[in-house]
Image: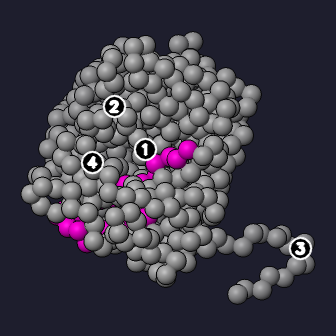
Amino acid sequence: MDKPEDMSSVYEFDPITGNIPATKVEITVSLCVLYTQGVETKQWREFGRTEVIDNTLNPDFVRKYILDYFFEEKQNLPIEKFGFPYTKGFKRLKLSLSLNNGGTRRIPGKKCGSIILSAEELSNCRDSATMQFCANKLDKKDFFGKSDPFMVFYRSNEDGTFTICHKTEVVKNTLNPVWQSITIPVRALCNGDYDRTIKVEVYDWDRDGSHDFIGEFTTSYRELARGQSQFNIYEVSNAFIVTLLSFSVESESTFLDYIKGGTQINFTVAIDFTASNGNPSQSTSLHYMNPYQLNAYAMALRAVGEIIQDYDSDKMFPALGFGAKLPPDGRVSHEFPLNGNIENPYCNGIEGILEAYHQSLKTVQLYGPTNFAPVVNHVARYAAAVQDGSQYFVLLIITDGVISDMAQTKEAIVNGAKLPMSIIIVGVGQAEFDAMVELDGDDIRISSRGKPAERDIVQFVPFRDYMDRTGNHVLSMARLAKDVLAEIPDQFISYMKSRGIKPNPAPPPYTGPGNTHHHTQI
């Protein structure tokens, strides 16, 4: 799962540790998987993994890790290696050590090869540069055709080395390529230092990964910012020329920019009332109402809802159930209001949802099957009606079992990916949740009828992975909320960017009736 890289505020409070990071650092590793360690449980969790590069013993990965750095903590970073000439294994090092010695550290392998890890503090620059290049008279590298050129951009580091930051697409069979426009965060391109050297290499793509080097040139952000001019025509070795066709820069909007501008987060919850949960009157049931503690459904609801509710001004939330027989005729429903009011399924705050949930357990009969598509389509209908950026919809599905309508749910998610909505699925109990992992789409984008989802909008987690061993439910809920909500800002931003929606300006700060200062509206 890709982690948020919102740099709008370096000083972000961590609700789990209670700490404020001193800064953020970018970690570059040379397929590796990076893990981070929980403060309380000391359990390792995957933080991210690089892309795969075929047929090379010296990979240079584009994907980076953005980590909070705490001076006062020992931050171990295990790295799992794959694809090297020896078997996979772990290497563990401290983040503080990788920040020393110029920010670069070599980790030797047991038999041969090594991993090179670089760490650099990130600037707080939120600009992104969009540029387009073309080239003329490239060298012909392919025997049976022309070249298949692509460009690789590198940022120079403080120790004189270079870090890859972007690769263009491959333009097939041409000696005069015109590449598509590319957008690179300025902090990735030069970390906010406009005079820092940027190196660009040009290669001829080969299917087996042994790409042929054609040539290279150097420039800087300051030079590129001059746009199309004589300063951005680069004569490269072998007499070919690379030309900058266009350059523009804009500030990246963050999740908080939209929230400050008035965007509302609409929260809907859907609860599984299938019979596999067990008889609610028995203590073995996942729906059992223990008078002394919340059940897993209530804990998941409160954990996620109490955070999301702060982004909704009226605190009125639709609450739905699925998989139950309803009175008086016993018909099975997969989209019924917990409060029994079809015309107005809204509940007042999280406490109102919990109260409606408890009442439903007394009136409906748990049945089946486990169908998600109706509640996904329910929220999608509301999201389809408001696509101007003023509202964004989050559906929380809490379930105990294997999904029964996978094909229909996939289709609903693919359609929902075009809309301002995200879906959180929390699995409770000890069932196998393999199908939910497929819906998550982190490794393979979900598709329906051969059509892939426009963006990833689903986050799935099994609640059991977050349960505190000492029985501290507050800690369990905090861990759950942190992980399931982590992807929402990025999913939110991906929708807004795909639709070209900018945040509204934030309203002026409230000055109070006793303040005599007057503000002039421009």
Name the kind of residue labelled 4 in the image.
His
Q: Check if residue 414 falls in the magenta segment.
A: no
Name the kind of residue labelled 2 in the image.
Leu
- In this figure, which residue is indicated by the disc labeled 4? 211
- Give coordinates of residue 275: x percent, y percent: 24, 25
Name the chief secondary structure element in magenta. loop
Residue drawn at x 48%, y 75% is: 232
- In this figure, which residue is indicated by the disc labeled 3? 515
Q: Is residue 312 left or right of residue 510?
A: left
> Which residues are drawn in magenta?
161-183
Cα–Cα gap, marks 2 and 4: 13 Å
Q: Which mark is residue 57?
A: 2
Cα–Cα gap, marks 3 and 1: 50 Å
Q: Which mark is residue 228?
A: none
- Give coordinates of residue 329: x percent, y percent: 18, 41
N-terminal of the pair, mark 3 or mark 1, is 1
